[in-house]
Image (cartoon, rainbow, N blue to C red):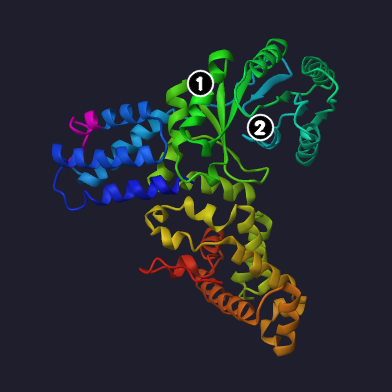
């Protein structure tokens, strides 16, 4: 997420290494590079201008601590300004209303409104323990209603069935009444999008807003559209009282222009950020954590929260007890750890949140490919329970059967066995099987063996 911006800013800070103080000359040189990085990240020009001016004024003032070198001082100032333009602190949903509290989803077609509606329903059910009903007022896009129905069922949310032959105003009125009758805490309304802003779409959504009187009107926007995302949000906000923004597809956005522009241009907070395709991949937007990621300093708090939520604690405790008793770490344990890592979004997601990983060469980061781990899991799945518990029994014929069954090569299986032995040695040193250490060691031997090369082993 925002990899290009992270890499370019890191290069700017490195240029200040070895400088004794922040002088007007090296400040201007650094600001020139920061400005170029932001423009290349597709940040809105007005935001770039204000951002640079704020950094300049703080750099030449009294805010630079004498204990910091110039690079550290500039990083501290840039981090503070990044947090400021993104909103300083996380803003929660305001759901204090007579049930059902209505959340209206708005945005252009293709931004991810329907998926975000289901992800939001999941968040409200799991995190806030709310009973949720969803409804689709999108009678124009084929299968839009069916898509929301399927996604709602997958997260255990209620769904009000609408028909394409019905008028959107009638749909939302009936859904609101049904939500009241079933005592739903929250009603999420998915609206129709268009390929571009037009008066017909705006008139329709204004009518729906007047009927529903929602407590939250969330604008859903694709982060990969850069500063256009902020401009579109502003156009919606001019005719609709938006209360916040959901930024989608941030995991595929290497630039970050939308995240850095939306709040400054619209004055509306980013409340959630979509970080993947899984239904759980919708995170509250924390400006300080995102600023830390952009500057390559990781996001340990979010990583800890993910471990708490997604790692099977009983399974981890069972493995820890097993290792303490000296029973070893077999391939079934290895497979379970691969599954745990996949539940956390894969190696790339974990790496992004580890401090210092942002300073790795981009060539090293690009070598991290979760498909390698999917292949490893397929190989282990093709083994018998006896083979998983005792890999030493694997002879030539067994190896051929396993590789045919998993669609892999003998070399792939041999690499897996080698990496498993490395994991076994690491587990013996752990004396307790701490989950965080286990997860850190799962980079196919990558994290422990990085050394100074910055290279990850290929699989």
Q: Position of residue 424 (x, y in %)?
A: 57, 75
The residue drawn where x is 66% and y is 32% is: 113
Q: Which residue is mark 1?
A: 234
Q: Nearer the viewer, residue 225 or 391?
A: 225
Magenta residue check for 62: yes
Q: Position of residue 359 (x, y in %)?
A: 37, 55
Residue 23 visible in the shown view: no
Which quarter of the figure has residue 452? Answer: bottom left
Looking at the image, is 196 positioned above or below residue 119? above
At label 1, counting other C-alpha atoms closer than 10 Å, the crowd grade (few under 14, some 14-19, many 20 or more) is many
Q: Position of residue 260 (x, y in %)?
A: 43, 33
Looking at the image, is 140 positioned above or below residue 66? above
Q: Position of residue 159 (x, y in %)?
A: 81, 30
Q: Secondary structure at mark 2?
A: helix
- Residue 113: image tag: 2
Looking at the image, is 338 positioned above or below residue 255? below
Disc 2 and disc 1: Cα gap in Å?
17 Å
- Residue 271: image tag: none
Q: Nearer the viewer, residue 321 or 97?
A: 97
Q: Where are the magenta residues, as a range?
A: 56-66
């Amino acid at each position: 997420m925002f990899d290009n911006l992270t890499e370019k800013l890191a290069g700017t800070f490195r240029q200040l290494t070895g400088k004794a103080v922040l002088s007007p000359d090296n400040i201007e040189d650094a600001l020139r590079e920061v400005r170029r990085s932001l423009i290349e990240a597709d940040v809105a020009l007005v935001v770039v201008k204000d951002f640079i001016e704020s950094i300049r004024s703080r750099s030449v003032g009294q805010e630079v601590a004498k204990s910091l070198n110039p690079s550290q001082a500039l990083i501290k100032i840039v981090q503070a300004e990044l947090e400021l333009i993104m909103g300083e602190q996380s803003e929660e949903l305001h759901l204090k209303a007579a049930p059902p509290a209505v959340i209206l989803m708005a945005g252009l077609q293709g931004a991810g409104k329907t998926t975000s509606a289901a992800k939001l329903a999941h968040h409200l059910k799991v995190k806030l323990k709310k009973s949720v009903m969803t409804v689709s007022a999108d009678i124009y896009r084929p299968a839009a209603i069916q898509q929301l129905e399927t996604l709602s069922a997958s997260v255990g949310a209620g769904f009000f069935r609408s028909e394409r032959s019905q008028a959107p105003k009638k749909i939302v009125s009936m859904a609101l009444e049904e939500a009241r009758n079933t005592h739903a805490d929250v009603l999420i309304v998915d609206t129709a999008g268009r390929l571009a802003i037009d008066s017909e779409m705006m008139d329709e959504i204004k009518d729906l807003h007047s009927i529903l009187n929602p407590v939250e009107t969330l604008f859903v926007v694709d982060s990969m559209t850069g500063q256009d995302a902020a401009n579109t949000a502003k156009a919606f906000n001019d005719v609709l009282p938006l209360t916040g923004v959901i930024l989608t597809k941030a995991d595929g956005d290497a630039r970050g222009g939308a995240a850095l522009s939306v709040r400054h241009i619209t004055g509306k907070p980013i409340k959630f950020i979509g970080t993947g395709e899984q239904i759980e991949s919708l995170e509250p937007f924390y400006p300080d954590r995102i600023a830390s990621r952009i500057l390559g300093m990781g996001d340990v708090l979010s990583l800890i929260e993910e471990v708490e939520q997604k790692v099977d604690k009983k399974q981890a405790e069972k493995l820890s007890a097993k290792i303490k008793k000296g029973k070893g770490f077999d391939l079934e344990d290895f497979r379970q750890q691969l599954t745990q890592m996949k539940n956390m979004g894969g190696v790339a997601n974990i790496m992004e949140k580890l401090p210092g990983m942002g300073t790795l060469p981009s060539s090293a980061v690009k070598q991290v490919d979760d498909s390698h781990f999917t292949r490893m899991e397929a190989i282990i799945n093709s083994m018998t329970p006896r083979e998983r518990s005792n890999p030493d029994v694997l002879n030539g014929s067994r190896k051929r059967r396993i590789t045919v069954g998993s669609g892999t090569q003998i070399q792939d299986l041999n690499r897996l066995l080698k990496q498993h032995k490395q994991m076994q040695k690491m587990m013996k040193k752990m004396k307790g099987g701490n989950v965080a250490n286990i997860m850190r060691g799962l980079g196919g031997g990558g994290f422990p063996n990085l050394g100074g090369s910055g290279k990850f082993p290929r699989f």
